[in-house]
Image (cartoon, rainbow, N blue to C red):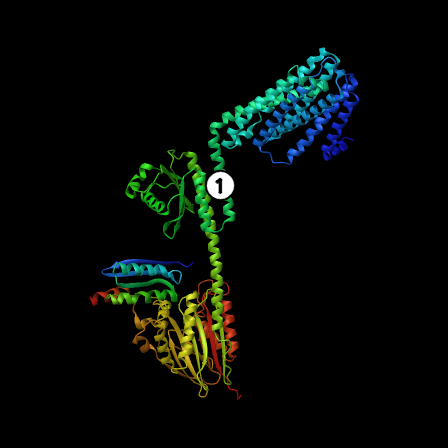
C-alpha cells in the first residue's frame, strides 16, 4: 500500500497543507478530513504544497473540487504550489488551471492571500 | 480347551448359568442329603459355578450400560432389603427341626432351594453393583485389587471343606475370612466418584448410604445369627453362607465409607458444582465458536453464559463499533440501565489491566442516587475483550448477593472473556467475508451491466474502419465509449471516463451514456453537446466527481471531423508515421457549471486523409504501471502507434495491448482500459 501523509501548518492567516506520497481513492479521505477540520475552524485560506507528492488520482483531484466552493464562498480559496511536472500535467489535462491558481512557490501563494487583504 | 470354555462362557452366559442352576436343583432332588465328602465337594463346586457364571453375566450387563451412581446405590438398597424380606419369609416357613434333617418333607426342601436361588441371584447382583461402583471414575485399572479380593472369597468359600473334614481346621477358614475383610476394607476406599456428584445428589447419597448401612447390618445379623435362615443356607451350602456373609460385610463397610466420604465432601460441594458449571459453560462456548456464525446470536449466548459461569444475577456485553462501545446484549438487566451504568463505570477511568476489575456498590452509588433506579447490585465485575492489543469490547457481570467476586470468579470471568473475544472476532470475520463475497457478486453484476451498456459492434463503413477495445479493471471503473449514427454521412464517437471507481462510478457511467445518447441526436456540434451534457450532469454529479470526455463527429463524405475535449487524455493522430497530439482546450465535465466551462471548450477540426489513424483512449493506458511504479506513459504509446501506422485498426489495437501487457506484466490492472481506433482506408488501391 502506497504511503500518503498530510500535514497542516499555519503561515500567518493562511493554512498550508503539505501533501506527501500517493494520493488516491484509498488515501483521499485523510485529506478530506483535513479540509473538513479547516472548515470547522473557519480557516478558509488554504495553500496546498505539492512538493513531496508523487502521484495523484482522479479521486485525489475530487477532494479539492469538493471543498473549493465553500472556501471561496467564505472569501477564501484553495491555491496550489510547488507541483512537479508530472502531477501538474494531470491537473492541466483536466483543466484545473482554468479554475484554480497554481504557483511555483509556496510563499508566492501565501502572499497572494495577504495582498488581497 | 480353556479357550473353548471361555468362548462358550462368553457367548451364552445366561443359558449356561440357568443350566447349572437346573443341575444344582436336580442334584438337590437326587441327593437331598450330601454330607458325604465327595458329594459335598461336588455340591459346593456347583453352587460356586452357578454364582460365578451369573456374576460374569451381570458384569457384561453392566458394561453395556452407562452407570449412574445414585440409581445404582438405590438399586443396591432395594435388593438388600429384599434379601431381608426373603430371609424373613423363609425363616417363618422353614423353621427346620434342626437335628432331624431327614424328616424334612419334599415341598419344604423344594421351597428352601428356590429361596436360596433367589438369594444367590440377589447377592450376586448386589456384588456386581458394588463392583461397578468400585470401577467408577477410576483413572488407572484397579482390577487387580478386585481380582485378589475375589480369589480370597474363593479360598474362604472352599475352606469350608476343611471344616467339614475336621472342625479343628476352622483356623484356615478364619484366616482367609480375615484377609478377605481387610481386602474389602481397602477396596471400599475407592469412592472418588463421590467428588464429581452435584451437591443435590451428594445429600441424596448420604441418606441412601445410611439406609444401606442399616439394611446391610440387618442382613448380616440375619445371616450370621445362629438360628433361622442361617441354618437353611448353612445346611444347603456352608460356603455360600460364608460368601453371602462376606458380601453383606462388603455392603456395610462400603456404605459406611460412602457415608463419611460424602459427609466430608458436602462443604466443598457447592464450590465443586460451580467449577463444573464453569467448565461446562466453557465447553458450551467452544461449541458456540464452531457452530454459531451469527454475530448477534453469539453475543447473546455469551452474555447468558457469563451469568452462569460466575454465578451472577445479571450480565451484559459491549462491542466496539467504530470508535465507540455499544451495548450489544443484556441478560437480566434493562437495556437502558445497563447502558447508563456502563457509561458511568467507564467514565470513572478505572485502571484497565488485562484482567478483571471489581467494583463495589459504593463506587456506583452516585449513579444509583442520580438515577433512582432499582439497582440491587452489590458487586460488579468486568473484563475487557482483547483483540491484538486493542480493546474490542467489555464483558460485565453483576451480583445481587452480598458475596464479593473472589479470585476464582475473576479467573473464570477473565478466561471466559478471552474465549468470548476470540469467538466474537471469529464471527465478525465470517460475517465480513460473507459480506465481501456479496460485494464481489455485486461487482460482478456491475461489471456485467457495464459490458452490456457498451456497444457490441463497431460501425461498418467502407472507408472508415473502427476498432474498439474495453478491458475492465478488477474494481469496476467508469470508462465509457460509444458510436452514434447522426445521419447518413455523420457519425459521432465518444470516449468518457468517470472519476473514481466501483459501483458509484459504474452508475454514473450508465447515466453518462444515457445523456450522450439522447443529446447527440439533438446537438450535432461537439462543443454545444459537451456544454449541454455538463448542464445535465450538474444535477447528478456530487461535487467531488467529474467526467472527462472526448467527442468527435466524422463526416464520411469529406473525411473532416470536428472534435471537442473536456479534460480527457488527448487523442492521437497518426499521419504517415508522424504523431500529433490532438488536445484542444476544455475542462472536465463537472468541474464548473458556469460560464468557465463553456468558455474553456475549443473545438478542433481535423482532416482525415487516407491511411490516417485517429486514436481515442482512456487514461488507463498511459497510467498503467509496472512493478517499479513506472508509468507506461504517453511517449511509449505514441512510439508504438507511429511504428504501426501501416497496420489495420484492429492490428494496431492488438499491438498496443500486447506492449501494454508486457510492460505491466507483474502488476495488476488498476483502471479500466478503453481504446477506440479509427483508420481511413483507400479502397481504390
Q: Residues within 10 Å of mark 1 (few under 14, many from 20)?
A: many
Q: Residue at x 50, y 70 (%)?
A: B659
Q: Is residue A80 left or right of residue B307?
A: left
Q: Residue at x 46, y 43 (%)?
A: B419
Q: Is residue B71 left or right of residue B278?
A: right
**Above or below B673: residue B257:** above
Give x and y (percent) for residue B632. Answer: 45, 68
**Above or below B270: residue B152:** above
> Hey, which quadrant is residue B121 in on the image?
top right
Give x and y (percent) for residue B499. Answer: 39, 68
Name, please, the residue furthest toward the top: B168
> Hey, which quadrant is residue B361 in on the image?
top left
Q: Chain of mark 1?
A: B
Q: Secondary structure at mark 1?
A: helix
> Hey, which quadrant is residue B491 in on the image?
bottom left
Which residue was labeled with disc 1? B282
Would residue B391 be visible to someone looking at this image? no
Amino acid at each position: 500500500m502506497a504511503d500518503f501523509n498530510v500535514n497542516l501548518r499555519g503561515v500567518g492567516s493562511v493554512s498550508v497543507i503539505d501533501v506527501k506520497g500517493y494520493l488516491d481513492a484509498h488515501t483521499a479521505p485523510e485529506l478530506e478530513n483535513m479540509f473538513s477540520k479547516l472548515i470547522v475552524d473557519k480557516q478558509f485560506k488554504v495553500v496546498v504544497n505539492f512538493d513531496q507528492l508523487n502521484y495523484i488520482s482522479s479521486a485525489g483531484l475530487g477532494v479539492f473540487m469538493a471543498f473549493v466552493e465553500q472556501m471561496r464562498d467564505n472569501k477564501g480559496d484553495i491555491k496550489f504550489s510547488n507541483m512537479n511536472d508530472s502531477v501538474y500535467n494531470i491537473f492541466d489535462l483536466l483543466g484545473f488551471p482554468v479554475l484554480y491558481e497554481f504557483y511555483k512557490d509556496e510563499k508566492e501563494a501565501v502572499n497572494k492571500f495577504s495582498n488581497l487583504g | 480347551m480353556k479357550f473353548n470354555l471361555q468362548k462358550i462362557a462368553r457367548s451364552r452366559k445366561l443359558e449356561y448359568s440357568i443350566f447349572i442352576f437346573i443341575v444344582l436343583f436336580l442334584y438337590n432332588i437326587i441327593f437331598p442329603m450330601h454330607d458325604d465328602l465327595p458329594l459335598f465337594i461336588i455340591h459346593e463346586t456347583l453352587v460356586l459355578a452357578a454364582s460365578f457364571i451369573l456374576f460374569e453375566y451381570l458384569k457384561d450387563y453392566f458394561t453395556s450400560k452407562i452407570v449412574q451412581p445414585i440409581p445404582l446405590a438405590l438399586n443396591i438398597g432395594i435388593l438388600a432389603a429384599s434379601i431381608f424380606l426373603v430371609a424373613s419369609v423363609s425363616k417363618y416357613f422353614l423353621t427346620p427341626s434342626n437335628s432331624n434333617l431327614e424328616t424334612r418333607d419334599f415341598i419344604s426342601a423344594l421351597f428352601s432351594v428356590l429361596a436360596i436361588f433367589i438369594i444367590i441371584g440377589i447377592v450376586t447382583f448386589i456384588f456386581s453393583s458394588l463392583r461397578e461402583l468400585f470401577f467408577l471414575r477410576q483413572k488407572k485399572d484397579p482390577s487387580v485389587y478386585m481380582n485378589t479380593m475375589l480369589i480370597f472369597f474363593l479360598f474362604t468359600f472352599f475352606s469350608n471343606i476343611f471344616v467339614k473334614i475336621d472342625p479343628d481346621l476352622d483356623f484356615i477358614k478364619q484366616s482367609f475370612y480375615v484377609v478377605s475383610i481387610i481386602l474389602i476394607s481397602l477396596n471400599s476406599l475407592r469412592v472418588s466418584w463421590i467428588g464429581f456428584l452435584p451437591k443435590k445428589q451428594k445429600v441424596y447419597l448420604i441418606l441412601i448410604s445410611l439406609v444401606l448401612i442399616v439394611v446391610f447390618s440387618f442382613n448380616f445379623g440375619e445371616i450370621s445369627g445362629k438360628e433361622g435362615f442361617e441354618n437353611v443356607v448353612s445346611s444347603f451350602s456352608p460356603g455360600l453362607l460364608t460368601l453371602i456373609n462376606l458380601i453383606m460385610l462388603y455392603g456395610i463397610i462400603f456404605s459406611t465409607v460412602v457415608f463419611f466420604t460424602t459427609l466430608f465432601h458436602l462443604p466443598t460441594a457447592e464450590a465443586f458444582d460451580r467449577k463444573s458449571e464453569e467448565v461446562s459453560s466453557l465447553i458450551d462456548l467452544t461449541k458456540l465458536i464452531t457452530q454459531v456464525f451469527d454475530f448477534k446470536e453469539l453475543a447473546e449466548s455469551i452474555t447468558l453464559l457469563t451469568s452462569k459461569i460466575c454465578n451472577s444475577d445479571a450480565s451484559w456485553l459491549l462491542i466496539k463499533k467504530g470508535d465507540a462501545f455499544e451495548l450489544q446484549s443484556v441478560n437480566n438487566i434493562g437495556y437502558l440501565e445497563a447502558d447508563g451504568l456502563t457509561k458511568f463505570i467507564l467514565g470513572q477511568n478505572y485502571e484497565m489491566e488485562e484482567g478483571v476489575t471489581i467494583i463495589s456498590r459504593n463506587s456506583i452509588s452516585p449513579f444509583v442516587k442520580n438515577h433512582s433506579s432499582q439497582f440491587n447490585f452489590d458487586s460488579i465485575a468486568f473484563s475487557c475483550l482483547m483483540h491484538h492489543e486493542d480493546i474490542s469490547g467489555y464483558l460485565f457481570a453483576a451480583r445481587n448477593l452480598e458475596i464479593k467476586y473472589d479470585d476464582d470468579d475473576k479467573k473464570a470471568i477473565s478466561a471466559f472473556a478471552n474465549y468470548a473475544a476470540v469467538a466474537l472476532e471469529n464471527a465478525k470475520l465470517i460475517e465480513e467475508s460473507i459480506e465481501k463475497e456479496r460485494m464481489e457478486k455485486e461487482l460482478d453484476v456491475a461489471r456485467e451491466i457495464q459490458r452490456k451498456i457498451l456497444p457490441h459492434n463497431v460501425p461498418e463503413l467502407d472507408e472508415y474502419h473502427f476498432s474498439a477495445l474495453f478491458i475492465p479493471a478488477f474494481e469496476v471503473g467508469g470508462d465509457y465509449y460509444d458510436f452514434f449514427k447522426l445521419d447518413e454521412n455523420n457519425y459521432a464517437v465518444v470516449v468518457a471516463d468517470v472519476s473514481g471507481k466501483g459501483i458509484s462510478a459504474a452508475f454514473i457511467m450508465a447515466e453518462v451514456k444515457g445523456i450522450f445518447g439522447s443529446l447527440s441526436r439533438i446537438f450535432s456540434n461537439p462543443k454545444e453537446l459537451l456544454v449541454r451534457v455538463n448542464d445535465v450532469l450538474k444535477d447528478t454529479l456530487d461535487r467531488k466527481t467529474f467526467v472527462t470526455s472526448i467527442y468527435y463527429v466524422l463526416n464520411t463524405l469529406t473525411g473532416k471531423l470536428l472534435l471537442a475535449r473536456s479534460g480527457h487524455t488527448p487523442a492521437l493522430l497518426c499521419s504517415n508515421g508522424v504523431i500529433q497530439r490532438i488536445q484542444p482546450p476544455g475542462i472536465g465535465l463537472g468541474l464548473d457549471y458556469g460560464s468557465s466551462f463553456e468558455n474553456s471548450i475549443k473545438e478542433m477540426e481535423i482532416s482525415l486523409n487516407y491511411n490516417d489513424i485517429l486514436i481515442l483512449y482512456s487514461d488507463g493506458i498511459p497510467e498503467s504501471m509496472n512493478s517499479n511504479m513506472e508509468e507506461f506513459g504517453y511517449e511509449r504509446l505514441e512510439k508504438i502507434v507511429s511504428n504501426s501506422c501501416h497496420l489495420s485498426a484492429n492490428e494496431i489495437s492488438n499491438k498496443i495491448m500486447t506492449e501494454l501487457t508486457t510492460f505491466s506484466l507483474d502488476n495488476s490492472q488498476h483502471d479500466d482500459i478503453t481504446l477506440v481506433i479509427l483508420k481511413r482506408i483507400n479502397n481504390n488501391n
